[in-house]
């Protein structure tokens, strides 16, 4: 079923209203949808590299707005909506332990989830549930999602179709390594 959903999202890249479809996919991916907007962004940018920045901008704005919906689900409807969504993603049991530490690391959690393949929707819901300050959540979401979408757009704009395989297969790993190095750097600086 997930493969059919993935194929359906890819087929939408050729749709005349693909930017609107991207906006919807980016919005719902931030709170409930399992397919990331990159799946739609990549073929759209390859088809029209001159629109790379517009495509990344639409994904960014829509994703942050969708993240705010996820935040609202966590803040106002966690037990009715947020908990079932997180349980469906296999994250339900770890929520209580996670809640205790989340706000101490909130900025980093949102930044990491916004940039890496970790499900951003988990962090948006958790941010609302734990009461993370809304401004911190929004600012970090803009930074993280901007880095992710504009990096993909830049790579495709600069290198075109040959970079597609790298993005689809290895960009997540490279981003995770970058975040580990970033955290490691802050850890080393803290104890020097």
Image (cartoon, grey):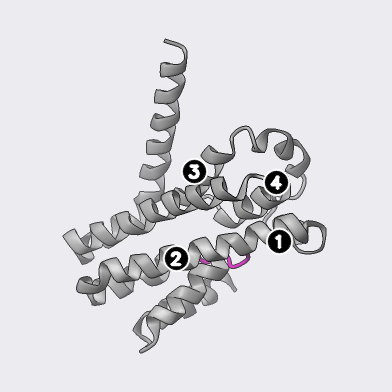
First-in-chain label (4 vs 3): 3
Tell me the residue that label 1 is attached to. Answer: 73
Badge 1: how crowded within 10 Å, few (<14), some, or many (20+)?
Answer: many
**What x and y, as percent, mark residue 90?**
70, 52
* Alpha carbon separation for disc pair 3 and 1: 20 Å
Tell me the residue that label 3 is attached to. Answer: 112
First-in-chain label (4 vs 2): 2
* Direction from residue 179 to residue 2 in the image, left or right: right
Tell me the residue that label 2 is attached to. Answer: 61
Query: Which residues are drawn in magenta?
Result: 32-36
> Quarter holding the N terminus?
bottom right
**What x and y, as percent, mark residue 134?**
60, 50
Tag 2 secondary structure: helix
Q: Which of the two marks, 3 or 1, is nearer to us in this view? A: 1
Tell me the residue that label 4 is attached to. Answer: 131
In the picture as drawn, the residue positioned furthest to the right comes out as 79
Tag 3 secondary structure: helix
Q: Is residue 40 visible?
A: yes
């Amino acid at each position: 079923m997930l493969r059919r959903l993935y194929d359906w999202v890819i087929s939408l890249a050729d749709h005349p209203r693909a930017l609107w479809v991207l906006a919807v996919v980016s919005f719902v991916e931030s709170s409930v949808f399992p397919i990331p907007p990159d799946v739609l962004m990549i073929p759209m940018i390859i088809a029209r590299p001159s629109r790379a920045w517009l495509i990344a901008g639409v994904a960014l704005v829509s994703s942050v707005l969708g993240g705010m919906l996820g935040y609202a689900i966590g803040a106002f409807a966690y037990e009715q909506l947020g908990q079932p969504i997180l349980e469906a993603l296999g994250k339900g049991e770890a929520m209580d332990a996670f809640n205790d530490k989340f706000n101490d690391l909130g900025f980093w959690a949102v930044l990491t989830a916004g940039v890496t393949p970790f499900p951003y929707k988990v962090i948006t819901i958790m941010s609302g549930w734990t009461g993370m300050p809304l401004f911190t959540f929004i600012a970090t979401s803009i930074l993280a999602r901007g880095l992710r979408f504009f990096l993909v757009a830049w790579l495709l704009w600069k290198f075109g179709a040959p970079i597609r395989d790298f993005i689809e297969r290895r960009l997540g790993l490279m981003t995770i390594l970058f975040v580990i190095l970033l955290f490691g750097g802050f850890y080393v600086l803290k104890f020097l």
